[in-house]
Image (cartoon, rainbow, N blue to C red):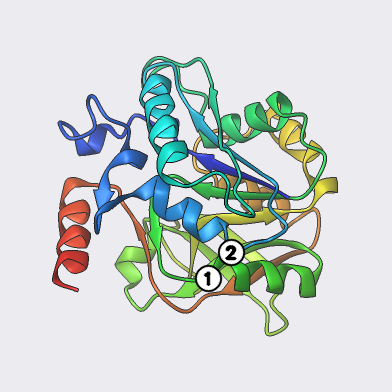
Amino acid sequence: MVAIILAAGYATRLYPMTKHRPKALLRIGGETILDHIIKKIAGIEAVNKIAVVSNGKFHLKFDVWKKNYMKNARPANAGFIEPVVLNDGSVSEYTRLGAIGDICFALEALTVDEDVLIIAGDNYFTFSLADLYDYYKKMDADCIVVKRHADREALKSLGVAIVAPDGVVTGFEEKPQDPKSDFAVYATYIYKRETLPLFRTYLDEGNPKDAPGNFPAWLYKRKRLVAYAFEGDCYDIGTREIYKEISKIFLDS
């Protein structure tokens, strides 16, 4: 399995913190968001490659991060994977490829021909990726992650899935004005090898390239898609207020 971390956005809502630093390299609880994600990925033994998708503005920042990571992570350890940093070539908010464009870019750049784990580089979460992977193997289907969310207003700014009792996704909307479910979808996905060509199909049809949830919202109508309901927390670091709030939570703990 290949793990792809999406970190090519420009995070303009977090300016000035992210004007000269990518969001994935912000620190929470003494470590970068990216370091936290990679630690979680290490729980999946099937992962044999990790790719970080950056952009033309910040890829050198990620190169520096990688050098420090290689120095501190003790590459001699069993199971260590040297991450690959990819540059999608965009240089501004106006030229970005979008999350789904970056997924397609990474799949083609790496010539991926195996299952793929995809994670947004601005998500800080406490649930186990190993448990997610076990569920994925059991269900043998493309998989999204969900959690019940009581705040109906908050659901309007998230992806929302309708999930049948057997775990199959029967409905999916990005940022619905009238949420038909309380299952909020977070930006962590596992896709089967045979699903990967559909990313190019999706883009060739002219569908939205930005939010990664737009792809499973399109996919569930075409093939079986299941949802893993996780226990724990997942924070989307979208604004300065959220970043400060989460930083304080981990500082207090």
Where 224 sits versus 108, above or below? below
170 left or right, relative to 156: right
210 left or right, relative to 113: left
Q: Name the secondary structure under disc 2.
A: loop
Q: Position of residue 217 (x, y in %)?
A: 62, 53
Where 11 sits versus 90, above or below? below
User: Which residue is located at x 22 percent, y 26 percent?
Assistant: 19
Q: Quick check: marks 1 and 2 in contact, CB under 8 Å?
A: yes
Location of mark 2 (residue)? 43
Residue 34 in sight from this viewpoint: yes
Q: Position of residue 200 (x, y in %)?
A: 74, 31
Q: Name the secondary structure under disc 1.
A: loop
User: Which residue is located at x 64 percent, y 54 percent?
Assistant: 79
Count neighbours of disc 2 (C-alpha within 10 A) and say few if under 14, some if 14 to 19, many if 20 or more. some
Alpha carbon separation for disc pair 1 and 2: 8 Å
User: Which residue is located at x 18 percent, y 33 percent?
Assistant: 15
User: Which residue is located at x 43 percent, y 64 percent?
Assistant: 178
Q: Amino acid at mark 1?
A: Ser
Which residue, as the protein is rendered here, is positioned at the far front? 76
The quadrant of the image that shows the C terminus is bottom left
Residue 182 in sight from this viewpoint: no
Q: Position of residue 131 (x, y in %)?
A: 61, 74
The one of 115 and 71 positioned closer to us in this rendering: 71
Count neighbours of disc 1 (C-alpha within 10 A) and say few if under 14, some if 14 to 19, many if 20 or more. some
Location of mark 1 (residue)? 128
Q: Sequence order check: which comes first, mark 1 or mark 2? A: 2
170 left or right, relative to 25: right
Viewer-side label of 1, 2: 2
Q: Amino acid at mark 2?
A: Gly
